[in-house]
Image (cartoon, helix red, strand yellow):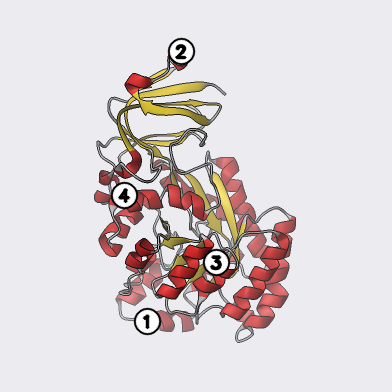
Amino acid sequence: MAGFVLKNATIATMAGGVPAYGLIENAAMVAEDGKIVWVGADADLPAHLQSLPQEDLEGRLVTPALIDCHTHIVAGGNRAREFEMRLEGASYEEIARAGGGIVSTVRATRQADEDTLLASALARVDHLIAEGVSTVEIKSGYGLDMETELRMLSTARAIATQRDIRVRTSFLGAHAVPAEYKDQPDAYIDEVCIPALEAAHAQGLADAVDGFCEGIAFTPAQIERVFVKARALGLPVKLHAEQLSNLGGAVLAARYDALSADHLEYLDEAGVVAMKDAGCVAVMLPGAFYTLRETQMPPIDLFRKHHVPMAVATDCNPGSSPVTSLLLSMNMACTLFRMTPEEALAGATREAAWALGLPDSGTIETGKLAELAVWNVAHPAELSYRIGYNPLARRIVGDLS
Ligand code: DI6
Ligand code: FE
């Protein structure tokens, strides 16, 4: 693989600390063999690197490529009709009782073959790529039987063969209790979830293990059984926690050294401290907050006070967050959660990389992977400021092309 120089750029390295955004004006950077080998002022570009192919960016902004660290982008069907029903006055519970809600996505996903799942997921993934996303996390959890959970994960893996994007998979068998195990969540965990996790691991389909710890899903004790198995298999864990109530999910996740705990609207300070001590990233999902018209804010000030890193992701799913724009999610993180534009961009780059256990990604620093987004904007705050506007000039992954 060749090398290249980008010059006459504004580079937001997102390396942390000062200056804000790690901003370097009149900047250049050099990549070789897919890695960043030099970043600094144009004027300081070393002579021995000047023979590489150069591109003049005419002052454009360069950031790390974006990372969407929480999606359910592989799923069958859609729930637009339920959206209409809710606007006509039906409650989420009424819709669920009438066979809608998450159960309807499970039904549609079980009925879809891999080609169908792949085609619908690629259409959504293409939206992310067009916004400069280089890495997407994708969960199972709409199969809730062995065969469909594995099909979801192999579809997720297939995405990386069809597009120039890195995929990290999370096994989410503990997402909901399927109809055939109604009122028997423990039997579901023992008879389906754990055997499916073992099979996913044996087939190399799971990079991490997730769960949904909530009154409408699984208790901490049930989730812990899944985490014990994950640990035995050597897989890292993460958790949907404190989205609708505080069951102590984040504390549980921290005890298992989770990469992240996600949602967290109902988290308290003890949970924040536990996350800090465990190095657990807080993943903010403002698309779900918006769609569900939630009013309880995640404890942003406590995350700041205790220095818990905050990531931002789309939570792209057919029910609670039909969002395929990470830029819009960054805007919502600012407007709805009062995160700063710098926190939002860090959340979709550096902190998202940590939430996926990818220390080689997420910032523009020597030694990191050359995964870059070039934008037609002058200042990085514009990325979170605009609504429904995509200023991407180009995405660079590995090499110029
Ligand atoms: N939290 C959510 O908001 C979604 N899953 C989860 O664990 C809901 C998924 C759906 O309604 O399809
Ligand atoms: Fe989710």
Q: Report if residue 332 is visible in the image.
A: yes
Q: At 70% from the left edge and 70% from the top edge, which residue is drawn?
A: 194
Question: Residue at 57% of width from left, 41% of height from top?
Answer: 162
Total tally of numbered discs in the picture? 4
Q: Which residue is mark 2?
A: 51
Q: CA distance from mark 2 to mark 1?
A: 64 Å
Residue 166, by quadrant, is top right
Q: What amino acid type should be assigned to the residue bearing mark 3?
A: Ala
Q: CA distance from mark 3 to mark 2?
A: 55 Å
Look at the numbered disc 1 and say if its residue's Cβ is closer than 8 Å to ligand 1. no
Name the amino acid, label 4.
Glu
Q: Nearer the viewer, residue 323 or 240?
A: 240
**Horizontal and vertical percent position of residue 296:** 33, 74
Tell me how far mark 1 sits from mark 3, CA to CA: 21 Å
Residue, disc 3: 108
Q: Earlier in the sequence, mark 1 or mark 3?
A: 1
Mark 2: few/some/many CA within 10 Å (<14, 14-19, 20+): few
Callout 3: helix, strand or loop? helix
Question: Residue 91 shows which numbered tag?
Answer: 1
Q: Is residue 401 visible?
A: no
Mark in the foreground, 1 or 3:
1
